[in-house]
Amino acid sequence: MPGSKLIVALDFASLSETDSFLKKIKGADCKVKIGKELFTTEGPRVIDLIKKYNFEIFLDLKFHDIPNTVNKAIKASCSHGVWMVNVHAAGGKSMLDAAYDAIAESNHKPLLIAVTMLTSFDEDNFYNLGFKKGLNDQIIHLSLLAKESNLDGVVCSAKDIASISSIIKDESFLFVTPGIRLKENNTNDQKRINTPAEAIKNGSDYIVVGRPITENNNPFEVITKINAQI
Ligand code: C5P
């Protein structure tokens, strides 16, 4: 599908639930994201299913392991012909370099993005992790690590973009932002949220939206509405 900045999170439990949903959004202008639940349950056949609907795929498995393991996992991801893959920046420079090398050595080259801090973290639960820096400084630190390893961008809250781009002055560095809610939605477990329009205004290149679309009876309509707002 051409152009859309909207990535719909397919957080479903099975292939059949995913297929029912994809039927409802067939032809919509968006990309889709496969997360841990669906991929762990159904494996690569979910990728084959989505390809039949012609949506570009973000394989959101957030790898975080020793460099060699992440290198192999990214190579395996590349072999599925997906559009975007990701790792946790907290895996460190060697792991990020190994992820980058995996893409460089693969025939198919998806965008490689690093998760900074999950958008389910706020200052309170962040301090429980024992980091010495503040949340914002930690996000900038992790973004710089990703940039140094030549990754294509980061996953962060749209609220973090201004401070990251004040340090990383590279227009091609991508910001992928979950934690998106429409005005009428519940926040669920997300803490640092923005509306679609706010996120794009803040400089987001792609917004990730799950439950506000997947839990709606007319997801096609919500996608159209969000596309109009961004
Ligand atoms: O339903 P909701 O819109 O909260 O879904 C957000 C999606 O984005 C989920 O699939 C979640 O795993 C993912 N995500 C996130 N925060 C990150 C990275 C990914 O919420 N930092």
Image: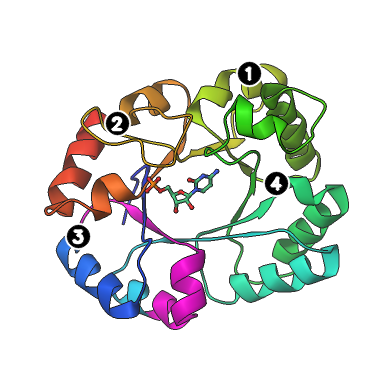
- In primary-sequence order, the first of circles 1 and 4 is 4
Circle 4 SS class = loop
Q: CA distance from mark 3 to mark 2?
A: 18 Å
Task: Give percent across and percent down for residue 98.
Answer: 81, 60
Amino acid on which the number 2 mark rests in the picture: Ile
Which residue is tagged 2? Answer: 230
Amino acid on which the number 1 mark rests in the picture: Ser
Which residue is tagged 3? Answer: 25
Q: Is mark 2 within 8 Å of ligand 1?
A: no
Q: Residue at x 74, y 62 (%)?
A: 104
Determine whether 163 is above or below 29 in the image: above
In the image as oriented, which residue stretches furthest toward the right? 94
Which of label 1 and label 4 is nearer to you?
A: 1
Callout 2 touching callout 4 (CB < 8 Å): no
The answer to if 128 sits in the magenta stretch is: no
Circle 2 SS class = loop
Amino acid on which the number 4 mark rests in the picture: Leu
Q: Is mark 1 within 8 Å of ligand 1?
A: no
- In primary-sequence order, the first of circles 3 and 1 is 3
Q: Nearer the viewer, residue 53 or 183?
A: 183
Q: CA distance from mark 3 to mark 1?
A: 35 Å
Determine whether 105 is above or below 137 in the image: below
Which residue is tagged 4? Answer: 151
Which of label 1 and label 2 is nearer to you?
A: 1
Amino acid on which the number 3 mark rests in the picture: Ile
- In primary-sequence order, the first of circles 1 and 2 is 1
Which residue is tagged 1? Answer: 163
- In primary-sequence order, the first of circles 2 and 4 is 4
Report crowding for label 2: few under 14, some 14 to 19, many 20 or more residues within 10 A (C-alpha).
some
Give, as a single range, the part of the protein colored magenta. 28-48
Q: CA distance from mark 2 to mark 4?
A: 25 Å
Q: CA distance from mark 1 to mark 4?
A: 18 Å
